[in-house]
Image (spheres, grey):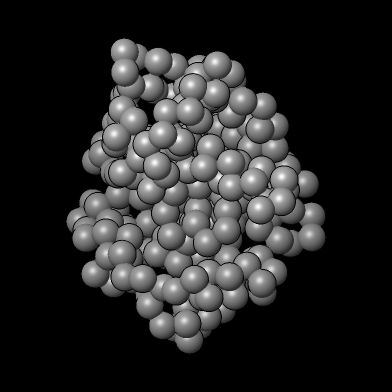
Amino acid sequence: MTDNDAAGVTAARLAMLLTAFRPGDDALGVSELARRTGVPKSSVHRLTGHLAAQGLLERDGGAVRLGLKLFEIGQLATRQRGLVDAARPYLADLREATRNTVHLAVLEGTEVVYLDIVRGPDAPRLPSRIGGRFPAHATAVGKAILAFSPEEALERVIGAGLPRIGPRTITAPGLLRRALMKVRTDGLAYEREESGTGVICVAGPVLDARGQAQAAISISGWSNRVHAERVAPAVKTTALTLSRALS
């Protein structure tokens, strides 16, 4: 194995260890990290020592937890931070106008990442969280972004497979393509129980000066509480206004 190959393996293992932590996790021991990552215990012990020395992990007895430096690094992601700061007043206004939960998301690979969530006062608690990910094909924000993205972004999603997430997830490439054509025509994407039972969502793309999606905003809630056709104009107006402000 060359030095470059060895460095690549080490970098991959470090990334696996850091991403092995899940929502709700506190400290994890070497055995649990080895189980989740498939990395040998001896390597986990050595690598977590290096990460702790750099402040990326913190020791808690014989276990480790994510370190504060990771949060600091996250705050340096200027593109996303700038987008969140610019979008927040618009998200707040949309939340106040509809009293539903509002999301801001971007596409990363085949998944959407939620950059900001403004919970509605009358809305139920949904499983989405800031920094959380979800398959793009099963969300309204994902479809809103894919409809206004280069073809290769859609091909990447289709190539990875379209697993069923909710009772009405689109799992056929042809159906997804037709759905995205309608999104391009309407400027809005809908999700009805595609991400989970009883969940409904309406999303609009946030476009750059070239007309390509750089993000999407949405309103989400339970299908027996959110009337998609009523909130859709507010979502579309907010997405267009934010698009102009960013451009």
Q: Quadrant of residue 83?
A: top right
Is 13 in front, or is 247? Answer: 13
Find residue 242 and report its image quarter: top right
Total number of numbered discs in the rendering? 0
Q: Judge whether 15 appears above or below 145 on screen.
A: above
Is residue 138 among what the camera can see? yes
Percent of width and height locating residue 152 = 66, 72
Residue 148 rendering spot, x and y as whole percentages: 64, 66
The percent position of residue 203, horizontal first and vertical second, equals: 48, 56
Q: State whether residue 102 appears in this view.
A: no
Tell me if residue 220 comes above or below residue 76 in the rendering: below
Depth check: give the residue in front, 52 or 141: 52
Instruction: Please tell me which residue lies in front, 238 or 143.
Output: 143
User: Quadrant location of residue 23?
Assistant: top left
Q: Measuring 42% from the left and 44% from the top, which residue is drawn there?
A: 39
Q: Is residue 231 left or right of residue 215?
A: left
Residue at 35% across, 40% down? 34
Position above or below: 60 against 131: above
Question: How far across and how far down the image is residue 157, in percent?
Answer: 53, 69
Q: Residue furthest front?
A: 1
| Residue at the image point whose x is 50% and y is 53% from the top | 112
Pick the front one: 198 or 225: 198
Q: Is residue 153 left or right of residue 59?
A: right
The residue at 67%/27% (across/down) is: 76
